Image: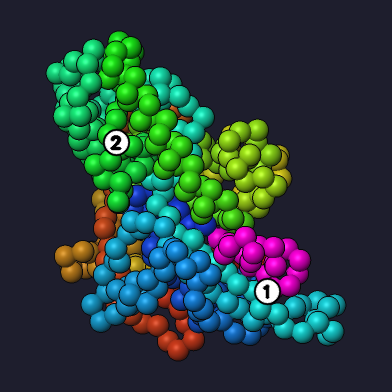
Amino acid sequence: MNIADDLMQGLGLSDPVIRLGVTGLSRAGKTVFITSLVANLLDRGRMHALRAAADGSIKAAWLQPQPDDTVPRFDYERHLAAMTGPDPHWPEGTRHVSQLRLSMRIQPRGMIAGWRGQQVLHLDIVDYPGEWLLDLRLMERDFDEWSQEVLDRMQGRPGADLFRAALAETDPASFSETAAQTLAEAYTRHLHLARDAGWSDCTPGRFLMPGELEGSPALTFTPLPHEMRQGALGREFARRFGAYKSRVVKPFFRDHFARIDRQVVLMDVLGAIHAGPPAVEDMRRAMADILTAFRPGRAGWLAQLLGSRRVERILFAATKADHLNRVQHPRLTAITGAMLREARDRADFSGARTEAMSIASLRCTTEDVIRQDGEDLPAVRGTLMDGRQAAFYPGELPANPAELLVPASQGATRWLDGDYAIMDFAPAPNTMRPGDGPPHIRLDSAAEFLIGDRL
């Protein structure tokens, strides 16, 4: 939507629009979330917790051409076919910004229903990589601060030793493009390995998804230890770090982020727990930084960029709840909420509504009970990626989130009281009936929190 469209809406001369941003860290399921949300808003038979769907206030829903001609369209039809076709499989993940417009004809409820006619509400969904969202934290750090933070946290992460070896072979007193590229390749390799191992805070985000910027000077720098920042190499890397913030990060948030009304941040909390205490603490810290940056009224660059515009509601959703039996869902939600507690309190105090929830955008399993060592364990059953059927019990999440978060914050390297397993399930064969969207867990509750007040 352009400035003229914003003005028309502000004057009440056009249909109202909700702009919903959807992001999340790697493997959190952004594409699946958007596809299933749209499919379930088009066919609302499974959306019982969305009040406007349950009481019939949503009279019709349809897809329209997106309002911004310069942003790629979210490929809804292809993703839905991948998830629900005769050979169901996971769609490709988010690689760039995309957008989709879903329009709904709404009959107002309550006292005004009798004299106010139906209205059309547009839901503009903006999909962008979570790796880019992490760059929020770079904007208020200089090169020295960022370098020190990254290097302090790097110990023990995959690929860290290879990057440090590359640093040891580099002369900081002089600058050459060849040396810069060698360091950048080693650092980028480290980021990919760390992300694949379950780490969340992997910045700069564009190093993981460079797109048309691959090989550019703006993506050819790395953190440097203190003793290497004083020479020609450090000066040039500091300049490129500044260019990355001003030429890459800031335009993204100005052009795409500044118009968002509601935001979903998807989190693979189970994957972090499986990876161990350092990954849990890393996710907690990354999410706190993100939520602090979202905080309305905050005196910082983002507040200045957004002006008076507020991100009114933010949902932090732990995905893949279908990997757990429902008896453990409250514990997953509690852990997610506890990870965000401090930052959520600050945001709530400033007027933004936030919520933590455990969901499955596309339910892949059924619930089961397995017998092990004379004990009945609440499990799930589904189809593995290789086509085999399996029943799975991941371990028992603690009732008290502090049992995970405290050792993680204190630097523990492994869980003392148990291991938490994960398993990759494939989408289940399509069993949708006419009028139903894809099966899910609490996607309707997520929609009620995000847009229910406007329906």
> Which residue occupies the foreground of this view, 215 or 104?
215
> Which residue occupies the foreground of this view, 211 or 408?
211
Q: Is residue 420 visible?
A: no
Q: Which mark is residue 15?
A: 1
Q: Which residue is mark 2?
A: 217
- Mark 1 residue type: Asp
Q: Position of residue 16 (x, y in %)?
A: 68, 70
> Which residue occupies the foreground of this view, 390 or 428?
428
Name the N-terminal-most of marks 2 and 1.
1
At 75% from the left edge and 69% from the top edge, which residue is drawn?
12
Work out which quarter of the rendered image holds the C terminus and state it. bottom right
Relative horizontal placement of residue 214, taking residue 258 as reference (left or right): left
Q: Is residue 414 visible?
A: yes
Please say whether residue 108 is one of the residues in the magenta stretch. no
Colouring style? rainbow
- Mark 2 residue type: Pro
Relative horizontal placement of residue 178, taking residue 300 as reference (left or right): left
Q: Which residues are magenta?
A: 1-20
